[in-house]
Amino acid sequence: MNTSSFIAGRYFRSKKKRNFITVLSIISMVGVAVGTIALVVVMSVFNGLEDLIRSLFASFDAELKIEPAKGKSFLAPEAWLAEIRDIEGVEVLTEVIEDNVLYEHDDNQLVAKIKGVSDNFLDQGRFANGYFWGDTTLGTELRPGAILGRGVGFFLSIHLNEPNSSLKVFYPKAPRSAGSIDPTQLYNSAQLEPRAFFSIEQQFDDEYVIAPLHFTRDLLNYGEKRTALEIKVKEGASVADVQKRLKAHLGQDFLVKNADEQHAGLIRTVKLEKLFVFLTLTFILAIASFNIFFSLSMLAIEKKKDIAVLKAMGARDSMIRRIFLKQGALIALSGAVIGLVLGYLTVLAQDTFGLVSLGISSAVVDAYPVRIVWSDFAWISVAVISITLLASWRPAIIASQVETVREL
């Protein structure tokens, strides 16, 4: 083999190596971009689900809810209620009596909750989300009406257009005499007129019937006792500030919960799921970053002579390490920027056009809800940078250990 053939062979082999390293770097960049897109989209979906849960619960729950710290109920005399109404920021105060009762309609029976509420219950903007059909009132003193969850109505086979339809309600009570055999001494009973259905979330749809406060009070023999008070805050007032004022006024005997605290367990579960999904996808992104490790390792092997020349010219090991770390950072940064931009555009398209449907005909929303939180972008960027530094560190160390005398 002559000299020119040998040089040409080395040139083409070197060119193939460079092309291979370039392709590997591009693959690494694409892998980082895809992983970043997945993180942006999935975290935005969890944000959207969290907002959806809050909006659905807001249709049924109050902005602030007062409950006893101990026990099931508390005395609520009118003078005491008037003091709460006068607290700055309180617009509507709704009295609530809630307990389990037995419902009966057309030989169908169901144990569910009855929620007796003041006449101003619907003034708090209830049922703004979800579905609601029927009369928006709770009847009259003589003909009390009920707003039923769709699941309760379905189980009891209730039809709103059925003439003279009535819903029987039973509540157990202590008999006057221990030896009584009269069954009417064991329970109170009354009748409600079904007037409307609501559908918000299965937990509420299958368990709740809304009834007038006076009806529930008499049926359950509660008198001045209440199980909760629900507060609507004045427009423009801070919910947190009103909550602090109520806590200061009521003291240690009562709990004042905002919307998130009323369903703290569910909200916490969604946040934990989001955290674990973030960690899982970050781990997958770390696996994809192995391409950065391989491409930089190949580059360190390919550029041994160039590194030796730099060292002979006075370059320190720290400088060599920085060069390779910057090379890895450049690959990862390019992939991260592309991924963040494409992820943002994907989420924006989903929010605008609803590209991916839930596939549930009776769902409150047709498509997966999404919401962009800019702090998520910051955490994703931190994860990508950290993974890149870890993936680039070992090749940078290898490159800095090149022996000048041996390679030259």
Image (spheres, rainbow, N blue to C red):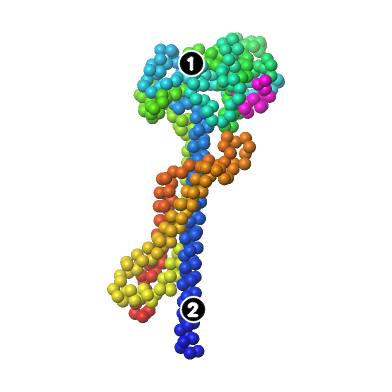
Q: How far across and how far down the image is residue 231, in percent?
A: 44, 23
**SS label for mark 2:** helix
Q: How far across and how far down the image is residue 156, in percent?
A: 67, 24
Amino acid at pointer 2: Phe
Which residue lies under the disc numbered 2? 12
Q: Residues within 10 Å of mark 2 (few under 14, many from 20)?
A: few
Q: Is residue 301 left or right of residue 161?
A: left
Q: Residue at x 40, y 56 (%)?
A: 385
Farthest-out residue, right: 107
Between the residue at mark 1 and the residue at mark 2, the CA separation in whole angstroms equals 91 Å
Nearest to the observer: residue 235 or residue 300: 235
Farthest-out residue, bottom: 2
Circle nearer the N terminus (1, 2): 2
Which residue lies under the disc numbered 1? 225
Q: How far across and how far down the image is residue 354, in percent?
A: 56, 43
- Residue 345, label in figure: none
Res 232 visible: yes
Q: Residue at x 49, y 78 (%)?
A: 13
Residue 260, compared with residue 341, is above or below; it is above
Res 283 visible: no
User: In the rendered structure, which segment of residues is drawn in magenta?
Assistant: 148-161
Q: Residue at x 48, y 23 (%)?
A: 124
Q: Residues within 10 Å of mark 1 (few under 14, many from 20)?
A: some
Q: Is residue 149 magenta?
A: yes
